[in-house]
Amino acid sequence: MPDWFDGWLLHGHMHNNVENYPFINLNNKFINILAELLNYTPIEIEELISFLQHKTCYNTIQDAF
C-alpha cells in the first residue's frame, strides 16, 4: 500500500496465520475477505461497514456475532 493512502485495504490471504491476517484489523486498516474467514459465505458491503462501525478487531466473521 502506498504511504500516502489512508483508506482501508481489502485483501484475501491468510497463510494459516489469523493473528497476522485477521478478518478486521483496525490498527492497520486491513479487511481480510478470505473465504475461510467468512465461513465460505459472501458478505454484503453494508454488513462489512456495520462491523467497522463497532471499532473492534475480529479474527473471523463468527467473532463478530
Image: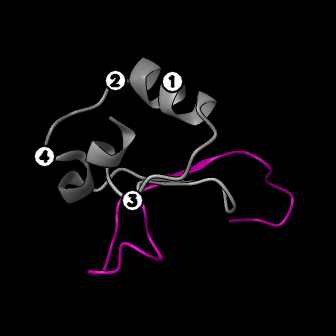
Q: Earlier in the sequence, mark 3 or mark 1?
A: 1
Q: Is residue 25 magenta?
A: no
Q: Given the image, on which type of amino acid does mark 3 rest?
A: Asn
Single out the residue that lies furthest toward the left. 40
Name the one closer to the observer, 10 or 48.
Answer: 48
x 29%, y 30%: residue: 43
Label 3 Cα crowd, 10 Å radius (few <14 / some 14-19 / many 20+):
some
Name the one closer to the observer, 23 or 8.
Answer: 23
Single out the residue that lies furthest toward the right. 4
Determine which residue is flagged by label 4.
40
Q: CA distance from mark 2 to mark 1?
A: 10 Å
Considering the numbered disc 2 on the image, is that residue within a helix, a strand or a loop?
loop
Q: CA distance from mark 2 to mark 4?
A: 13 Å
> Is 24 situated left or right of 40 in this image?
right
Which residues make up the magenta segment?
Answer: 1-22
**x then y, percent, for residue 28:** 67, 62
x 53%, y 27%: residue: 49
The vertical placement of 6 against 22, above or below, is: above
**x then y, percent, for residue 4:** 86, 58
Determine which residue is flagged by label 3.
59
